Image (cartoon, rainbow, N blue to C red):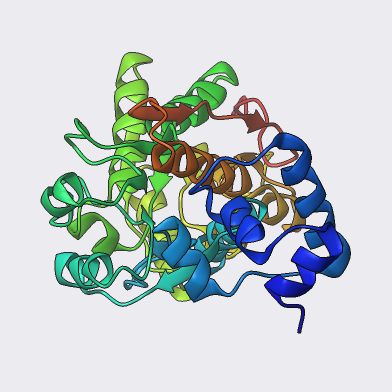
Amino acid sequence: MVKITDVARHAGVSPSTVSYALSGKRPISEETRRRIEASIRELGYRPHAGARALASSRSNVLALVVPLRTGIHVPVVMQFAVSVVTSARQHDHDVLLLTQEEGEDGLRRVADSALVDALIVMDVQLRDPRLPLLRTLDRPSVLIGFPAEPDGLTCIDLDFEAAGRACVEHLALLGHRCVGLVGSPPEVYARETGFAQRVVQGFTATAERHGLTSAFLPCEATPAAARQVAERLLREQPALTGVVVHNEPVVEPLIEAFEQLGLRVPRDLSVTAICPDELAEQVRIPVTSIAIPSAEIGARAVELLMKKLDRIPVPEATLLAPRLTARASSAPRPAH
């Protein structure tokens, strides 16, 4: 294992000078710093995590708080997690993944332990019980998601209200007059999860503005539930010709269910979804969709956190505009 004394000998300086270069506690010349950094790279020296934390008063660890609650789609959550981990490594930080549903007690325990420098918090509810603590912690945080009252917090997310709006706008432009939203599992709405509620708001308000008949039904993430929801939609809205899906696992089962019920996609029924591009592209009938930009959101959340750690001002709210990609599942409303 390469030691600090090896770096010092290679760079032609004392071990204490190498220590000062790593910690920044004392000024050294730029030429000496460059020489030490070159030796560190050439020798592959890695400072001991504990020593580095003592020198910088930082652990170089971020917490990613993502409680794996019922109703969430784990593959999409993991896309966010991978993006956060990858981006954190580019800033020489590791990530501690916290998946238990512990609320503010869990956050306080992690913050008080000095295990992490800062926190990224996911699955944000409109009236999230963790928010009062996050506002008072001495560690910076970034929320992936927006509560009802985001003042004093740093939040980033896809603009899910605009996403719901864009799906309806797309269907309205194609002439559809009766549309349905197949949403996330019921417990997601019972918790008042922010992103899910905002899709419903955007969908409903835009349908009203265009004078469309609309219906919203939550849906459990199973093929059987997709079949039941399809049957109920057609029973309650017999003129239905357009559907928005905000529930990744049922996108394909829902299309299958409608086709088994006699509606061909897109000839009789147009389908749009809010889901990752790879899912939309892999369905038997590629689905018109608004992408979930997990890679961009995760990377930008880390960037915001790094700036906060360096006491650089950041915007409180970052909303990414939705991007709709038209594919084979949507078409003009049938004439009959």
* Residue sitting at x 56%, y 60%: 93
How many circles with numbers are drawn on the protein? 0
* Residue sitting at x 78%, y 61%: 40
Quadrant where the C terminus sits is top right
- Residue 121 coordinates in the image, percent (x, y): 35, 55
Using the image as rendered, state which of residue 325 and residue 225 is in the foreground.
325
> Relative to residue 99, is residue 326 drawn left or right?
right
- Residue 317 coordinates in the image, percent (x, y): 36, 28
> Relative to residue 84, is residue 265 drawn left or right?
right
Hey, which quadrant is residue 88 in on the image?
bottom right
Hey, which quadrant is residue 103 in on the image?
bottom left
Relative to 125, residue 16 above or below: below
* Residue sitting at x 68%, y 50%: 280
Using the image as rendered, state which of residue 38 and residue 246 is in the foreground.
38
Relative to 119, residue 296 above or below: above
- Residue 132 coordinates in the image, percent (x, y): 11, 49
Relative to 106, residue 26 above or below: above
- Residue 183 is at least partly visible in this image: yes
Which residue sits furthest bottom? 1
